Image (tube, rainbow, N blue to C red):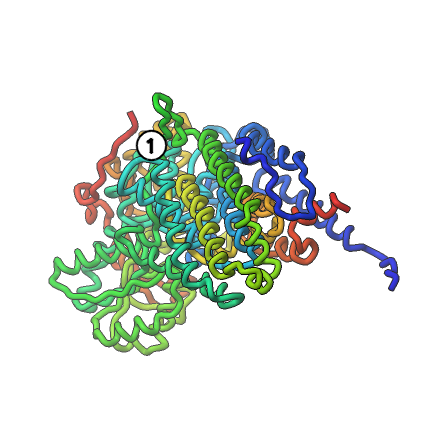
């Protein structure tokens, strides 16, 4: 866990500050204690982490490499199906389900990324949507394997076995939350290390000035492809967790609406900050959960909030808070 | 350039006010009201948005009406009933998430839903895992009370096989044995079409079929294929808005002059939404309001119209029956525990003022399926207020869907 408490902001202008980081982890670790008192529940907290991880994964590409993807639902959904296939058709093992989620999502990301990396701007973004929609229609149409529109059912996440010890994440929502948190911690730790490595610095260089980066001898297209693949890796982990959370996978997880939601989370929270997408996911998922109980027009409220954030806080909620603190 | 102070409300004030207003609205959901007695919480999940929304809203209206009636009659076990309604948005993943929310956050005592068979089927997995009593008011796919039946799940609407078996004879008698299906590509459509094909093959018929997305709106290519096949009858198996769009295009193409129209369900909500020329064909109604020989039905229709200004449809009746089933089961079991509720509901017969139709209407113990009459008849343009259907026959459900055919092996937890 200590690995994950390294401040991950790659922004040179920001001073290292451990207090906000400690606060974030303290809040996340104590969720099951305080959440019921504010009207929440464990599955909601797990969903925030799952979408937070997906948005942070996308943000590696969007916020730190400066490349837009409107098709990350593909890797999220393939992750979900990968986990579901293992549990439904092969073996009752959560670690193997997660491994399959990662393999399926990352392999698709690497393949699609290789085909798209030489395109830039709107052409790149359009291709990401197109590949995601291909995945969606395959899942929708392949009834005998994916369950079609009705989704892949009939599986459950399996308890974790550590020698003689069994952690029952299947029946215990709190233990499952901590399982999701542990995976989230490992992923954010890896992301933080990556962003502080020379490879991560080269991503930021591409974001800041791709032409100058190319003149420095860095193969921009290859680095965009690497960033895309790593981004798909983290998003597929989130997708695998999503399938375990719901004990279910369906084509909607591959649909462009999910891609759009993940982008909204990243932008709303602050795509130039490491933790911004998590904040965006927390706001989005929580508002969705509460407002959709009150009105069927809940997406209008999310839309209005998104517009307000873009207009008034162009660096996202966390970017705004950070600027206020520095001021 | 110096900025000049702006008179009136500034941007910051506006933002702060907006946030404060938002927080106030989030603090207390309007549907939850404080009451002296701990209410019995019923969680209702239906696609209030999307292509099946009209049907879903009728179910919810029926349920709300039943809650208002029963809350005046001592609620459930002497406690008031609180109905928490969630929108599944016609999306399976959202439906599953809403089921978990109602169970984990709101601690509901029972779950009801969903119109969409695929969502109902998926929610069944959650309620079974969480051991919550679950009534499916309007999701038709056979498996819910068939090979995937669960001890905690009961269903009010018919199975697709019941609907197909009830109307097949009339379709063959009035049109012939060459059929073309337009069917939605999800659980409901798959089992409905399979049931029709089974029944048609028994009579030596032939068919072609097209599977369409559940929310399809353009049927032109499919209708051209249908016309080329020259069927005796087109079976429009779509639901909600998709069925309405298909009907309108069928008429626009002039196909109503070339073939008959029919199928399993053409619900009051959909019939009212199409032009009179598309109000035709032989269909099933799962409950029909115009039963002058059933005094309980006459009284119900009168009271419902007075309360809501609407003529009750089968979907309203599903909502009515669902809430009454919850009350009757709880009072028979003297408990809200899922296993006791399930045991109490098995074999339970609906009283006449709930069944609102002739004959015995009961939950069959072997598959937890309600066994009502299926009203087979002809749809036509209105002959008076909402009188768009003439019943030719009321077929008892149990007579056309024997338990042995369901594939259900009911197993309770140890």
User: Residue B12 placed where, x, y %?
Assistant: 77, 51
The quarter of the rendered structure image containing the N terminus of chain B is: bottom right
Whether A269 is drawn above or below B110: the answer is below
Q: Foreground: B356 or B61?
A: B61
**Quick check: can you spot residue B317?**
no
> Residue sitting at 34 percent across and 21 percent down?
A164
> Residue sitting at 41 percent across and 65 percent down?
B384
Q: Is residue B37 left or right of residue A128?
A: right
Q: Furthest residue to the top?
A: A164
User: Residue B396 placed where, x, y %?
Assistant: 24, 48
Crowd band around label 1 with a 10 angstrom C-alpha radius: few (<14), some (14–19), many (20+): many
Whether A166 is drawn above or below A83: the answer is above
Q: Foreground: B161 or B174?
A: B161
Whether B32 is drawn above or below B117: the answer is above
Secondary element under disc 1, as helix, strand or loop, is helix
Q: Foreground: A323 or A278?
A: A323
**Quick check: can you spot residue A106?**
yes
Quarter-wise, where is residue B347 in the image? top left
The quarter of the rendered structure image containing the C terminus of chain B is: top left
Whether B144 is drawn above or below B234: the answer is above
Which residue position is annotated with label 1? B342
Q: Is residue A287 left or right of residue A139?
A: right
Quarter-wise, where is residue A92 in the image? top left
> Residue sitting at 36 percent across and 41 percent down?
A99
User: Residue B39 placed where, x, y %?
Assistant: 52, 32
User: Residue A149 placed where, x, y %?
Assistant: 35, 54
Q: How many marks?
A: 1
On what subunit does the disc labeled 1 rest? Answer: B
């Amino acid at each position: 866990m200590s690995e994950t408490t390294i401040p991950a902001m790659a922004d040179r202008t920001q001073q290292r500050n451990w207090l906000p980081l400690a606060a974030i982890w303290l809040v996340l670790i104590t969720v099951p204690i305080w959440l019921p008192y504010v009207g929440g529940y464990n599955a909601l907290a797990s969903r925030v982490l799952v979408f937070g991880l997906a948005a942070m994964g996308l943000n590696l590409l969007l916020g730190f490499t400066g490349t837009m993807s409107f098709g990350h639902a593909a890797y999220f959904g393939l992750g979900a199906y990968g986990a579901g296939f293992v549990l439904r058709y092969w073996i009752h093992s959560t670690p193997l389900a997660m491994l399959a989620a990662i393999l399926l999502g990352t392999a698709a990301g690497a393949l699609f990324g290789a085909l798209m990396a030489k395109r830039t701007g709107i052409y790149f973004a359009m291709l990401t949507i197109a590949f995601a929609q291909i995945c969606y229609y395959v899942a929708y149409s392949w009834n005998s394997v994916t369950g079609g529109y009705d989704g892949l059912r009939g599986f459950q996440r399996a308890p974790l076995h550590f020698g003689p010890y069994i952690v029952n994440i299947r029946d215990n929502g709190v233990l499952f939350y901590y399982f999701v948190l542990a995976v989230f911690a490992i992923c954010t730790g890896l992301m933080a290390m990556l962003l502080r490595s020379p490879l991560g610095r080269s991503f930021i260089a591409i974001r800041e000035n791709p032409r100058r980066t190319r003149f420095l001898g860095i193969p921009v297209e290859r680095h965009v492809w690497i960033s895309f693949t790593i981004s798909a890796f983290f998003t597929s982990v989130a997708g695998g967790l999503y399938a375990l959370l719901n004990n279910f996978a369906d084509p909607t997880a591959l649909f462009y609406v999910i891609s759009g939601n993940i982008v909204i989370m990243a932008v709303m929270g602050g795509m130039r900050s490491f933790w911004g997408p998590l904040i965006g996911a927390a706001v989005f998922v929580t508002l969705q959960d509460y407002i959709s109980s009150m009105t069927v027009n809940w997406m209008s409220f999310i839309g209005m909030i998104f517009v307000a954030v873009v207009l008034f806080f162009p660096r996202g909620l966390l970017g705004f808070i950070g600027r206020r603190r520095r001021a | 350039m110096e900025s000049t102070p702006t008179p009136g409300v500034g941007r910051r004030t506006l933002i702060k006010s907006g946030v404060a207003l938002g927080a106030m609205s989030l603090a207390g959901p309007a549907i939850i009201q404080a009451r002296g007695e701990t209410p019995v919480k019923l969680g209702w999940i239906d696609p209030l948005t999307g292509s099946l929304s009209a049907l879903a809203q009728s179910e919810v209206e029926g349920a709300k009406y039943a809650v208002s009636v029963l809350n005046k009659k001592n609620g459930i076990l002497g406690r008031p009933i609180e109905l928490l309604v969630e929108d599944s948005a016609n999306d399976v993943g959202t439906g599953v998430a809403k089921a978990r929310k109602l169970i984990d956050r709101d601690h509901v005592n029972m779950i009801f839903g969903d119109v969409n068979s695929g969502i109902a089927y998926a929610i069944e997995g959650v309620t079974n895992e969480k051991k919550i009593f679950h009534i499916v008011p309007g999701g038709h796919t056979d498996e819910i009370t068939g090979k995937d039946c669960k001890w905690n799940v009961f269903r009010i609407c018919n199975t697709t096989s019941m609907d197909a078996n009830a109307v097949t004879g009339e379709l063959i008698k009035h049109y012939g044995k060459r059929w073309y299906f337009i069917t939605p590509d999800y659980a409901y459509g798959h089992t409905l079409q399979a049931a029709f094909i089974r029944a048609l093959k028994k009579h030596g018929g032939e068919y072609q079929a097209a599977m369409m997305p559940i929310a399809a709106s353009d049927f032109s290519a499919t209708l051209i294929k249908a016309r080329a096949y020259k069927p005796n009858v087109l079976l429009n198996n779509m639901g909600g808005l998709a069925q309405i769009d298909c009907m309108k295009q069928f008429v626009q193409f002039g196909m109503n002059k070339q073939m008959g129209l029919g199928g399993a369900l053409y619900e009051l909500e959909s019939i009212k939404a199409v032009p009179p020329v598309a109000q035709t064909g032989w269909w099933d109604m799962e409950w029909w309001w115009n039963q002058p020989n059933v005094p309980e039905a006459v009284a119900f229709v009168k009271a419902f119209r007075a309360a809501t200004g609407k003529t009750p449809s089968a979907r309203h009746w599903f909502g009515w029956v669902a809430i009454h089933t919850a009350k009757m089961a709880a009072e028979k079991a003297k408990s809200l525990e899922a296993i006791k509720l399930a045991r109490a509901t098995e074999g339970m017969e609906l009283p006449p003022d709930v069944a609102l139709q002739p004959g015995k209407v009961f939950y069959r113990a072997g598959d937890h399926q309600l066994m009502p009459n299926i009203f087979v008849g002809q749809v036509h343009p209105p002959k008076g207020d909402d009188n768009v259907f003439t019943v030719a026959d009321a077929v008892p459900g149990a007579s056309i869907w024997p338990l042995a055919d369901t594939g259900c092996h009911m197993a309770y937890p140890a």
